[in-house]
Amino acid sequence: MQSRGEAARTSDHVRVVFIGDIIGRSARRFLADVLPKIRYRIHADFVIANGENSAGGLGIIPKTAQEMFQAGVDLITSGNHVWDKREAIELLKENQLILRPANYPPSVPGSGFHCVTLNNHEKLLVINLQGRVFMEPVVDNPFLIVDRLLKENPQKCVFVDFHAEASAEKQAMGFFLDGRVSVVVGTHTHVQTSDIRILGNGTGYQTDVGMTGSLNSVIGMKRQPIIQRFLTGMYQRFEVARSNLCIDFSVFDIACRTGKCVHASTWRILQDEMDPGLERLSAAFEQPEKP
């Protein structure tokens, strides 16, 4: 666990949990088992998860979205694999709580941002973006798009999922938005980074939250076919790995009055060591006794 800021919060803070890319059925089942416990132990106000790999490792469909919502996810973000299953087209048309990157062409279904009202009546704007370095060139400039969205949708509490390959592009986005949004997290690489912190102007930042999937894998997929692809260059059928599951997630406390992040921490809980992991989580977020 890496942590910045104070874990104890006051009534004017919003606690947001972000869950790294959920990969396949085994990860969805583990999520259903562990997420209610996480929410209860740290009193989370809102949970966001990247679900673009939830259907067989690539894409999202109504069934996988429903399972994630039933597990306790409040809003689902995505990225370049969001269109890998054709069922996603109608799904994104119908459900505003499933986002696709905002810098896709405006003609594509769905929306790249959504503003929710939390239980304490505070508003949280969630924005989904996709990077362009080493990614599909079809998307517009994410820096220009988010700049426009923030001007058109002024909110104090803003959470950004930047789905990008290059760490430099993610870091640049973090500094570009520092002080203008509450949190910027990176997704897509499925590798949890240890650089979680609060930037100089009050924005929580992490280059990549990680994944919910198998540690005995290459970014969630069975190892041997991918190794064989690197050895030969020939097509291989990739399959989701199912053993030694983990859930990578990060927790951010946002001050409602200012929109600044006051706490940021990142976590990994292993399926085989779930109870000890949850105990460590509970201890870190235990409210101090009043004098």
Image (cartoon, rainbow, N blue to C red):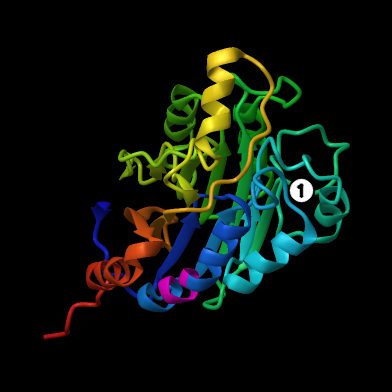
Q: Is residue 217 left or right of residue 278?
A: right
| Main secondary structure found in the magenta portion | helix
Residue 154 percent location from the top left of the image: 61, 50
In this orientation, which residue lies closer to the viewer: 160 or 47?
47
On the question of residue 165 being in view, the answer is no
Q: Is residue 93 left or right of residue 9?
A: right
Q: Is residue 189 left or right of residue 235?
A: left
Q: Which residues are magenta?
A: 34-38
The residue under label 1 is 111
Residue 222 percent location from the top left of the image: 54, 39
Residue 13 percent location from the top left of the image: 39, 68
Q: In the image, is residue 86 above or below residue 238? A: below
Residue at image position (45%, 50%) is 182
- Density class for disc 1 (Cα within 10 Å; few <14, some 14-19, many ≥20) is many
Residue at image position (64%, 36%) is 238
Q: Give residue 118's quadrant in the image.
A: bottom right
In this orientation, which residue lies closer to the viewer: 8 or 28?
28
Q: Is residue 211 inside the magenta stretch?
A: no
Residue 115 percent location from the top left of the image: 66, 59
Q: In the image, is residue 44 above or below residue 234? A: below
Label 1 element class: loop
